[in-house]
Image (spheres, grey):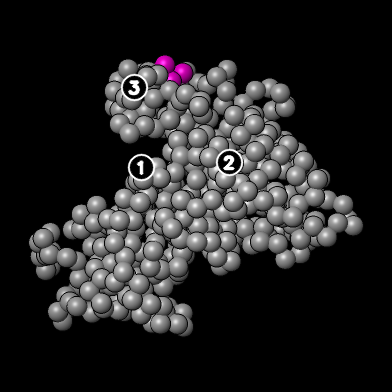
Amino acid sequence: MPCPEPPSQPPRIPDERPAGAPTGHPPAATADTSDDAAARAGLTAVAGPGDPAMGALLDEHGAAAVWQTLRRGRTPPAPPDARGGAADRAARWRQRAAGVDTDALLAAAAEIGSRLVVPGDPGWPTQLDQLGRERPYALWVRGTRDLRHACLRSVAVVGARAATAYGLHVAADLAWGLGQRSWTVVSGGAYGIDAAAHRGGLAAAAPGVAVLACGLDLSYPRGNENLFADIAARGTLVSEHPPGAPPSRHGFLVRNRIIAALTPGTVVVEAGARSGALNTARHAHRLHRAVMGVPGPVTSALSAGCHRLLRDGAAVCVTNTDDVVEQVGSIGTDLREAGDGGAVGGGVLDDTARRVLAAVPKRTCAGTASIAEAASTGIDTALSSLGLLAAAGFVERGASGWRAYRDP
């Protein structure tokens, strides 16, 4: 078996390898982790999000090798099963890469308080891996909560921008009820149902997650600027796009797959026959997530999409928080009467979770190992309990470990 190349040499793309050298192995084993993150940062500025051709290249060769090839002015070989036009897109990637400074991208992100999360990081939501070749190359994240833990108990609530008073009321009420039970509300930050759902969840003091279709330094739509600030203070803003990237129609449609993939279930509150919310529902169905629809007046065109989902059996009818939790919750844990407290409230924590919570400091951060020792439990058990406690809002991950969450 040939010896691996020295780490000082950049990983090679197959068309640069000598004859007879093995192919098909990503260079992650020899590429530095920081090189991989920088490469993925650059790729978010070069390739359109969720491009299966780029996903195939990353699976085959790794981000560092693909990025170095593009920066050298070369075109990576198209995957054998790539769809038509992959070669043209690769040529555009090469041209764009010549003008991208990854250090400047990361510095611009740091200036607005955002960070890059890549596959393999502790904060990476592993459920996104189910997107396969459409998985994000990386995520730009801004906020006080760890994205992975915030989405452990989450529900996507989506719907029409031009919503009716009925739809706005239902979305806010559902989100408030979910927040009361310690469920995170995930949506797209748009006007209408999205904004109502975000506000409802925040009113219940629950963290929120907004998946945006532009750079995190831009507030789009502008009228939701204060809402985005509230979400960042209590939850997380997420985007596949680097700082400065403007929104686009295609970007809104592509980001819907992330909303669907982050959560175990999606609720469509109000949607017309051609609403983008139906696109989110289709992604959720493809990923085998729970799809739920709220019925509306039969005379309302803005409920036609929901009614079609229900009629075709593509969604389960839900009318309140109990209905939603029944679809996405754990049997014997989440099915309880309204007003009974959060599903993982302080009164229903098991003994292990209580010990772990008691071992988490309030003012400083502590590592998982020290918390496990103080709680007299194993590291794996402590990490599992910390994930549940983070999802419920009891603790948060800081720069150097864990600490008890202090609501801003």
- The answer for how far apart the CA atoms under marks 2 and 1 are is 29 Å
Tell me which segment is drawn in magenta.
354-358
Confirm whether residue 152 shows in the render.
Answer: no
Q: Amino acid at mark 2?
A: Asn
Residue that appears at 42% across and 51% down: 140
Mark in the foreground, 3 or 1: 3
Circle 3 residues within 10 Å: few <14, some 14–19, many ≥20:
few
Residue that badge 3 annotates = 364
User: What is the x, y in percent for residue 206?
Assistant: 58, 32
Residue that appears at 77% across and 41% down: 169
**Residue 122, placed above or below residue 346:** below
- The answer for how far apart the CA atoms under marks 3 and 1 are is 20 Å
Horizontal side, residue 134 vs residue 221: left or right = left
Q: Amino acid at mark 3?
A: Thr
In terms of secondary structure, where does tag 3 sit? loop
User: What is the x, y in percent for residue 188?
Assistant: 59, 51
Mark in the foreground, 3 or 2: 2
Residue that appears at 43% across and 65% down: 133
Which of the labelled discs sits on residue 145, or is there none? none
**Residue 271, placed above or below residue 228:** below
User: What is the x, y in percent for residue 346?
Assistant: 55, 19
Residue that badge 1 annotates = 122
In terms of secondary structure, where does tag 1 sit? loop
Residue that badge 2 annotates = 226
